[in-house]
Image: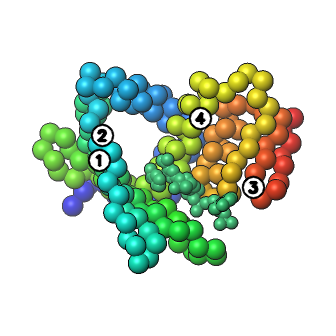
Amino acid sequence: MPRVILKQDEVEKYLHRASLLLPALEAALGNFSAGAAGGVVQPVRAVVPVRPHGGYLGVMPAYSAADDALTTKLVTFYEHKKDSSVPSHQATVLLFDPTNGSLKAVLDGSVITAKRTAAVSAIATKLLMPAFAEVLCILGAGVQAYSHYEIFMELFTFKEVMDTTGHIHFCL
Ligand SMILES: NC(=O)C1=CN([C@@H]2O[C@H](COP(=O)(O)OP(=O)(O)OC[C@H]3O[C@@H](n4cnc5c(N)ncnc54)[C@H](OP(=O)(O)O)[C@@H]3O)[C@@H](O)[C@H]2O)C=CC1
Ligand SMILES: O=C([O-])C1=[NH+]CCC1
C-alpha cells in the first residue's frame, strides 16, 4: 500500500493557486524540449476507447531524471452529460519510488489536471500573447474554463472576459 493518499480537497490545499505550478512546469517543459539531454522519458499517451459508453481511458507515464520522479496519470474522459453529478474528466496520479519501483503515493488527479492544463496555457500565453491584447475569450464553461479564468486573471490584465454562456465580465 502507498504511504500517502491525497484526496481532492488535500491536493487543492497544496495547489491553492495554479501559479505555484509555473516554475516547475516551465522547467519540465524545458527539459522535455531538450530531448535526451533533458532526461525526460514521456511516451505519447495511450488511449483506450470504451466505445459502448462513449468514453476513453488514457494512461500517461513519465520519468524525469532532473526531478528523479517516476509517475503516471490515469485519466478517464467521457462525453459531458447535462446535469450529471459525475465530472466528464476524472484522473488519478500514481507516484513511484524510482529507486525500487514501490508505489509511494496516490493523488487525486482532477485538481492537478485542471490547474496544470491552465498553467501550461498561461505559460504559452505569456510567450505568445500580443502586447495589445485586451479581451480574454473562453470557449466552454466547464472545469477548464474555470481554471483558465482563475490563472489568467491572476497573471494578466484584460479589459474584458467573454465566455460562451454569453456573459461579459468587465475587468477595468
Ligand atoms: N490538454 C489537456 O491536458 C487537457 C485537455 N482537456 C480538454 O479540455 C476540454 C474541456 O475540459 P473540461 O473543462 O474538463 O470539460 P467539462 O465537461 O467540464 O466542460 C466542457 C464545457 O464545454 C462546453 N461545450 C461542449 N461542447 C461545446 C460546443 N460545441 N460549443 C461550446 N461549448 C461546448 C460544455 O457546455 P455544456 O455544459 O453546455 O455541455 C462545458 O461547459 C475538453 O476538450 C478536454 O478533453 C481537459 C483536461 C486536460
Ligand atoms: O491530459 C489530460 O488529462 C487530458 N487530455 C485530454 C483529455 C484529458
Residue type (three-letter) at the residue carrying disc 2: Gln
Q: Which residue is mark 2?
A: 42
**For residue 13, side relative to residue 56 (left or right):** right
Of the numbered discs 1 and 3, the one sitting upstream in the chain is: 1
Q: Secondary structure at mark 3?
A: loop
Q: Quadrant of residue 17?
A: top right
Where residue 99 appears, as percent x and y from the top left, is: 14, 39
Q: Which amino acid, mark 1?
A: Pro
Q: Which residue is mark 3?
A: 164
Residue 143, above or below 158: below
Q: Amino acid at mark 4?
A: Ala
What amino acid is at disc 3? Thr
Disc 1 vs disc 3: which is toward the camera? 3
Looking at the image, the residue that sits furthest to the bottom is 52
Q: Residue at x 59, y 52 (%)?
A: 144
**Which numbered tag is attached to residue 122?**
4
Which residue occupies the foreground of this view, 52 or 66?
52
Which quadrant of the view contains residue 76? bottom left
Residue 20: x, y in percent? 52, 35
Image quadrant in which the C terminus is located = top right
Q: Nearer the viewer, mark 4 or mark 2?
A: 2
| Precedes in sequence: disc 3 or disc 2 | 2
Callout 2 touching callout 1 (CB < 8 Å): yes
Query: Residue 61 has which mark?
Result: 1
Disc 3 CB within 8 Å of nearest ligand 1 atom: yes
Callout 1 environment at 10 Å: few (<14), some (14 to 19), or many (20+)?
Answer: some
